[in-house]
Image: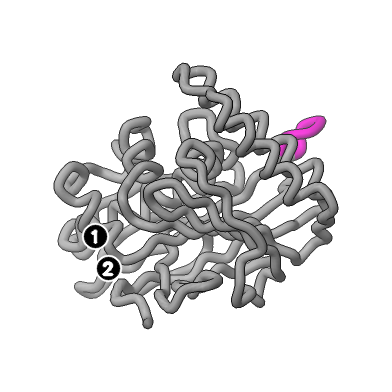
Amino acid sequence: MASLITVSSIAIEDFVFPPSVRPPATEKSFFLGGAGVRGLTIQGTFISFTAIGIYFEETAVASLADKWKGKSATELAESVEFFRDVVTGQFEKFIQISMLKPLTGAQYSEKVSENCVAIWKAIGIYSEADEKAIEKFTEIFKEQNFPPGTSILFKQCAPKSLRIAFGKHDAIPEADVAVIENGPLSQSVLESIIGKNGVSPAARESLAVRLHELLNPTKVANGEAEIKVANGEAKAETKVANGKAETKENGVEIKE
C-alpha cells in the first residue's frame, strides 16, 4: 500500500533515498522523513562512513502535529524533546543505514551497543533484560561484513520490537533476519542517530526541516525561510518564485 504523504527523494553522496519504501515483512509503505551522513573529522577532513535514511509510517505527522505544529524548523532542530517524541511516538519507523566505507558487523554492533548503554545509564534504566538484548544484538551482527553499497535495516515497532534485516542500498529484502523484543533497544537505535548526542547531526537537521514542512504546509507555501547547515550536512532553503514555493534539500530541488 503506497504512502499518502508526498515527499521528495534525498541524495546523500553515492546514494539516493527514495521518497517511500516498503520495509521487509510489511505491505505498508513508509515516507522519507529525512536523511544524512554519519562521519568523523580526521586531520581536518570530514570523512563520511554511512548514509542514513529515516522513514516513518504516515500516521507520524498526525501524531506529532498537536504538539509541534507551528514551530519553525530551527526550533524543532534545537529541541531535545521533539526528537524524543519522534523516537518514542506510537508510529513505526524504518531506518536504512547504507555503507560508504566498509565495516564489519562486530565494529558496527560494538559502537551501537556502547551508544545505547550510555543512553540507558544516563537515565538510570539499564536492566538485566537490556543487557541480554545487547548480547543478542551483537550476536546477530558478529559474522556479518558490510562492504560499500550494502545496508543495515531496522524497523522500530511499538511497543518494543526491533526488526533487523540486511540488504543492498537499492534492494530491500522481503524478510527480516531477526527480531529483538526489547523496548529500550528498539528506541535507542534511532535515538543514538538523531538524539541529543546522536551520531548524525545531518539526519537530525534533515528531519527537522522536512517534518516542519509536513506539519506546516501553508507556511512552506508562503516561502518562509528555513534552516541551513554547513559542512556538507542537511540544507534547506525556501523561497517564492512566480507565486510557487521552491525548496532545496540536500541538493534536491522541489517545486510546488
Amino acid residing under circle 2: Ala
- Secondary structure predominantly adopted by residues drawn in magenta: strand
Q: Nearer the viewer, residue 178 or 193?
A: 178
Q: Is residue 128 above or below residue 60?
A: above
Where, quadrant-wise, is the C terminus in this rendering? bottom left
Q: What's the residue at 55%, 68% (across, down)?
A: 17
Marks 1/2: CA–CA distance: 7 Å
Residue at image x 52%, y 56%? 35
**40 versus 121 height, above or below:** below
Task: Give percent across and percent down for residue 206.
Answer: 45, 51
Instruction: Pinpoint residue 85: horizontal percent, then vertical percent.
Output: 32, 40
Instruction: Please identify the quadrant where the N terminus is shown.
Output: bottom left
Specify the quadrant of the image occupied by residue 113.
Answer: top right
Left or right: 47, with 16 as reference point? right
Classify 10 Å Cα crowding around label 1: few (below 14), some (14-19), many (20 and above).
Answer: many
Query: What's the mark number on residue 220?
Result: 1
Q: Residue 174: give x, y in percent of width and height.
A: 60, 77
Vertical placement of 62 versus 29: above or below?
A: above
Q: Are marks 1 and 2 in contact (CB under 8 Å)?
A: yes
Q: Position of residue 137 (x, y in %)?
A: 67, 44
- Magenta range: 40-45
Q: Secondary structure at mark 2?
A: strand
Name the front one of labels 1 and 2. Answer: 1
In the rendered image, is residue 13 in sight? no
Of the pair 98 and 71, the residue shown nearer to us: 98
Q: Residue at x 72, y 48 (%)?
A: 48
Please name the residue that numbered disc 2 is placed on. Answer: 245
The residue depicted at 48 percent of the width and 36 percent of the height is: 184
Q: Is 180 situated left or right of 109 in this image?
A: left
Residue sticking out furthest to the bottom: 1
Residue type (three-letter) at the residue carrying disc 1: Val
